[in-house]
Image (tube, helix red, strand yellow):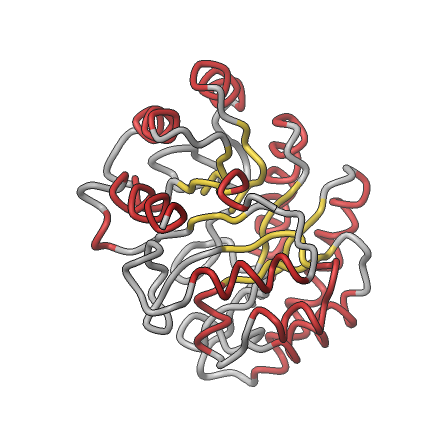
Amino acid sequence: MNFKDRLCAMNCHYRFYELEDFFQSVHKLGMHYVELWSGPMHYYVDARRHDSPEQLKKLCDRYQITIIGICPEQTNPKPNNIAVKQKHRQEEVLNYYRQMIDIACVLGCRQVLVTSGWCYYSEAVEEAWNRSVVMMKRITDYAKQRNVILALEALQPEESRLVNTIQDIRRYRNEVGSSCLKVCIDFGAMARMGHTPREYFEAFGSDIVHIHFVDGNPTGHLAWGDGSRDLKTDLAVLEEYGYQGYLSLETATQRYYEKPWSAEMKTLKSFEE
């Protein structure tokens, strides 16, 4: 498989540029796919309202880009914590993810990325875990109604103490018990916990529907060639297990903010070597 044709740009590191600048850059680089990060400077969504998806459709048409999935704002300190503790906030968080699912439907991309959310250091992890499972069940119920897949990624321990490892993902999915909750390999979180792509595929097989495909030392969400991972080895594993999804370049690192296109250029060059 030519994985270069499945590369998918993300707008995280374009946060100091307008959204159209991002689409224009992706087009100039010859890329065709985007996973849209819902940073409010680009596309605003909260519990009650959201920007019109029509502006996204126009950008896609203008620059011949396909949005393959939505990556909602959800890690600390963003307000959309799936494990939120305050009861008065729980309905707002649910409404936020329902809107994300609706937006995905309008755009025709049918995939939304999710995490477990996070807990307070001063509370029992299991309490937050249970809240997260209850909330995710409600979100997956809505996603199933709308025929949308949720791609669950692990977080690094510095981001959350809930779902970090392959074992955590397996337990969490079992407790949620929804056929529409699939798996996203985040290469940063994977490397942070000492896992490998092979271990993920052995654990989840075809339930892996998406990958945040980044280099690192071992973490860092870097462009390929800026870290120490072996690109050819990683791609060979994806080929071996018949991975059919996209490879999102989540280079969400400050070093790329001023010239974000340099990250995609570096990765594209690495694929040619």
Left or right: 168, with 231 as reference point: right
| Residue at screen point 61% across, 56% down | 90
179 and 41: which one is in front?
A: 179
On the image, the x and y values in percent for residue 54 come to 52, 18
Q: Is residue 253 left or right of residue 56?
A: left
| Quadrant in the picture for residue 220 | bottom left
Relative to residue 54, is residue 142 drawn left or right? Answer: right
Q: Is residue 123 above or below residue 155?
A: below
Residue at image coords 43%, 34%: 44
User: How many numbered tags mark residues here?
Assistant: 0
The residue lying at 38 percent from left, 62 percent from top is: 215
Residue at 77% x, 52% y is 180
Q: Position of residue 55 (x, y in %)?
A: 47, 19
> Which of the 4 image quarters holds residue 98?
top right
Q: Residue furthest left?
A: 258
User: Which is more toward the observer, 92 or 4?
Assistant: 4
Q: Is residue 44 above or below residue 139?
A: above
204 sits to left or right of 62: right
Choose between 228 and 181: the one closer to the eye: 228
* Quarter assignment of residue 11: top left
Q: Position of residue 46 (x, y in %)?
A: 49, 40
Residue 67 place in picture, x, y as percent: 54, 32
